[in-house]
Amino acid sequence: MHSDTSPARRPDPPADGLPLPQRYWAILAIILAIVMSVLDSTIVNVALPSIARDLHASSAASIWVVNAYQLAILIVLLPLSSLGEVVGYRRVSQAGIAVFTLGSLACALAPNLLLLSIARVLQGLGAAGIMSVNAALVRFTYPHHSLGRAIGINAFVVATAAALGPTLASAILTVAQWRWLFGINLPLGVITFCIALAALPHSERVQRPLNYGGALLYAGGCGLLLSGLQSLAHHEAGSVAVLQLLGGAVLTWLLVGHELPRRSPIVPFDLLRDRLFSLSLLTSICSFIAQMAALVSLPFEIQRLGHSAVETGLLMTPWPLALALAAPLAGRLADRYNPAVLGGAGLATLAIGLLLLALYPPQSGAFGFVWRMALCGLGFGFFQSPNNRTIMISAPRARSGAAGGMLSAARLVGQTVGAASVAILFRAYDNQGSNVALFGAALLALLGASISLVRLGAARPTVPVEEEPL
């Protein structure tokens, strides 16, 4: 272990980003890795009926192909971020790419639903390795003065990959069976791993023992809370869900007591004490709950308004397209202007767009729906990049892994809670649930905008003093 950390074996971390052309290769590795992990969170949804039919499973049971992947990511995301600070972010990312690729092979060869779900857990563990250190690697790859632009590009890539998932899945399924949805990851994973070995940046390492107790408490508490929430949303009998939620709450309470005294806890309470960091994180959670609630409910709302399934797919497209266009521009602006104002304006725009969609009259023309969807995408895009930049620069470089892990965790927790909330609303309001969800999403976006503007009182210089460009 000591020889591995010697200067002869491990180069010093870059002071102000990687030199060219290594920077371009590192960016390519980071982008390819995050594209694979994000695509596989959405690409499988379209194939669930085919998977259930081919593996002789029920439709309800096939949902575990999706849930297993998401839960696996969430229960190890922050522990892997903490591990990255100890062993190096590039190592965690490289291991994540390798495990994800092996998990994809296992998924493609799975003979039944149980083994497919287990393979999806393996795939999710690899995706967690990628996501947990993605933002930290971006911070060490780009020069500090371009960090906002870099995070904007990253947000653009994530949004585009998520939007292309269902479309790519449909294209593959027209010419091949569902197993190829996982098979396409094999050559891409091998190429990405080779580039990552050669190009990813080194980073400072923190000398501390691994926190096994905290990792176990976090995984247990997070897993029980999220599975309990999903059970509450999808099952009529709530006794199992209540037991899961109570068990998760107990483990979370034990986790807080275990981690609070530590200088670098797995759940970064040291960073959460920083007002700018915690407000930015809270804003992110509100925004992703609102976005996911809207994206899950909108297909039902569009068809409730009288449009066909084909029209629904077309009418959903303006949101991710507008987001993909706005994110890089917002990232550039965040390097010059106050991210609190940019983020607040973006979420206020999202709230207006969602409210206009909730009030959209039945049997109205498609054009009115299209520009409202685009307005939502623009608003979210102008929020996401500046907010992500603020989360990263408000943490010391040595805690980049924890900050990046919390950034990814906020997105995934928000998406999980948003989707589960819509399911609960459908149980409570039946066909009107989609419309109620849009109103609720608009209120959450407005709350997020308010929290974002509160950050004006906690603002710090655009680039921290200890991180000014050379």
Image (cartoon, grey):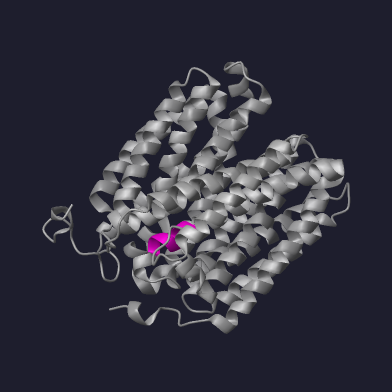
Report the residue that reaches farthest toward the left. 8
Q: Can residue 320 be seen at all in this image of the molecule? A: no
Tally of numbered tags: 0
Q: Which residues are magenta?
A: 400-407
Write down the quadrant of residue 237 in the picture. top right
Q: Which residue is nearer to you in this view: 62 or 381?
A: 62
Q: Relative to residue 420, is residue 26 drawn left or right? A: left
**Whole-percent x, y for residue 183 in the image:** 43, 28
Identified at 48% across, 82% down, the residue is 460
Q: Confirm whether the magenta stretch covers residue 267.
A: no
Residue 238 x/y as whole percent: 74, 38
Residue 100, by quadrant, is top left
Residue at left 62%, top 18%?
53
| Residue 405 belongs to magenta span | yes
268 and 172: which is toward the camera: 268
Instruction: Report the magenta stretch's main SS.
Output: helix
Residue 54 falls in image quadrant: top right
Q: Seen in the image, is 380 located left or right of residue 81?
A: right
2 to 100, vertically: above or below: below
Residue located at (61% from left, 15% from top): 56
Give the left or right position of residue 419, taking residue 216 as reference: right
Q: Nearer the viewer, residue 309 or 116?
A: 116
* Residue 352 in picture, x, y percent from top left: 75, 65
